[in-house]
Amino acid sequence: MYITTADQLKTFCENIQSADVLAVDTEFVRERTYFHRIGLIQVGGGNHFAAIDPISLPDLTPLLELMKDPTKVKVFHAARQDLEILVRLCGQVITPVFDTQIAAALVGWGTQISFAKIVYKALGKKIHKSETYTDWCRRPLSDSQIEYAIDDVRYLMPVYDKLIERLKKMGRLDWVQGEVHAWEDPKTFALPDPYKRFMKIKNLRSLRPRNLTVLQEIAAWREGEAVKRDCLAKAIIRDETLLEIARKAPRDAKALSGIRGFYQKELNKGGASILSAIERAMEVPESDLVELPESNGHATTRGVEELLSAYVQIRSEELKIEPSVLADRKQIHSFVAHFEQKEDMEEHFLFQGWRKELIGSPMYSLLSGKVGLKIDPSGQVRLIES
């Protein structure tokens, strides 16, 4: 069903009102805009499935009320970007959520599994993702495009059922909720702090503290403009040009216009604001200038991370899931750094939820010298008391 009118939307939402579980997907374009340009919202509940056209329907209230209903489980595959869209439309976080991609990793089907692969794994059915590069904001959409979009939620329901069955059998159903917990926090979907965006610009360490402060101010201005104009930040001023502006810190329009890569169009539109941002940076007291953290971070004791990585590999084989699901190399490094710098281990990611018992606590015991690793007569590597 392709929904383009308010009456159709109202009827559809009434039909799925009694469903406890909703399958949800979105189609969007985000190539030249700051925010997603939403083209379709697909929803399934019970035996009803539809592709809803948000371009034809400026008022999505009946649907959004269902999304906000805390008694209904919203099922997605690779939910992050879908949730960004829906949180912005709803003005609040969406709960509860179930992500089939995350669940698949927790039952040993592999990390970052595609929807086509998970459908085949769960249902034994091959589907073809032939519309991956469709411009979903262009109208009209063909019947085949609409059917393709609806299939994403039509197959999502039985995939969800299979995963729930497998998670219960393995005693891992609560693991999924732990993995999506961050999505219940509004901060997860808040716009990035504009005053931290300068840290993403390459070669910023070549600047002195005063010029770094200029870079911070003008990068924050650019981020704010990107939000207001709904465009990519680099479409306003490229990073290389922004870095050069920070290096030279021009104080008037003539000097600003002389910087390579800064064009008259932007000088007319934002030149005065850029000069004001530079002026603010130049007035910052010496004691408050930007200071960058050390680039290399904490160097852990040689061999320790390799030991823990070996243990993670062993546990992953025992649990039949990929090692990165338990702990990736970055998390292992962070864990060791926390331990060696005597930071609060209870706050670390590997001490949260199900990971604490399965991987965090044993790794902590290894670091503390309370246990060691041995190879038993069968060739298995096991923990032993020290």
Image (spheres, grey):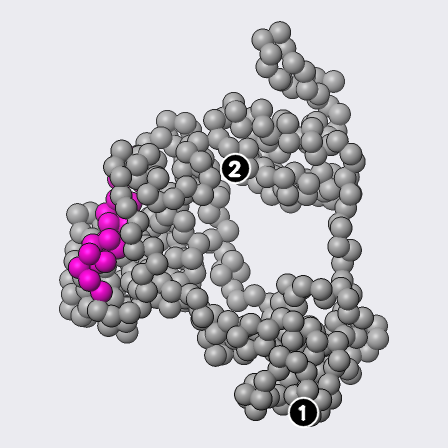
Q: Nearer the viewer, residue 44 or 378?
A: 378
Check disc 2: other Cα within 10 Å, few if <14, some if 14-19, many if 20+.
some
- Residue at 78 percent of width and 83 percent of height: 283
Q: Is residue 112 left or right of residue 268?
A: left
Query: In the image, what residue type sits under mark 1?
Result: Ala
> Are discs 2 and 1 less than 8 Å apart at CB?
no
Query: In the image, what residue type sits under mark 2?
Result: Val
Q: Where is residue 308 shown, x and y percent of the image?
A: 67, 30
Q: Which residues are magenta?
A: 141-162
Q: Nearer the viewer, residue 374 or 364?
A: 374
Q: Is residue 174 visible?
A: no
Is 320 in the magenta? Answer: no
Measured in 3D between alpha carbons, the distance from the residue under mark 2 to the one under mark 1, in whole angstroms, is: 52 Å
**Residue position for label 1:** 253
- Residue at 28 percent of width and 69 percent of height: 138
- Residue at 60 percent of width and 30 percent of height: 312
**Residue position for label 2:** 325
Q: Is residue 330 left or right of residue 185?
A: right
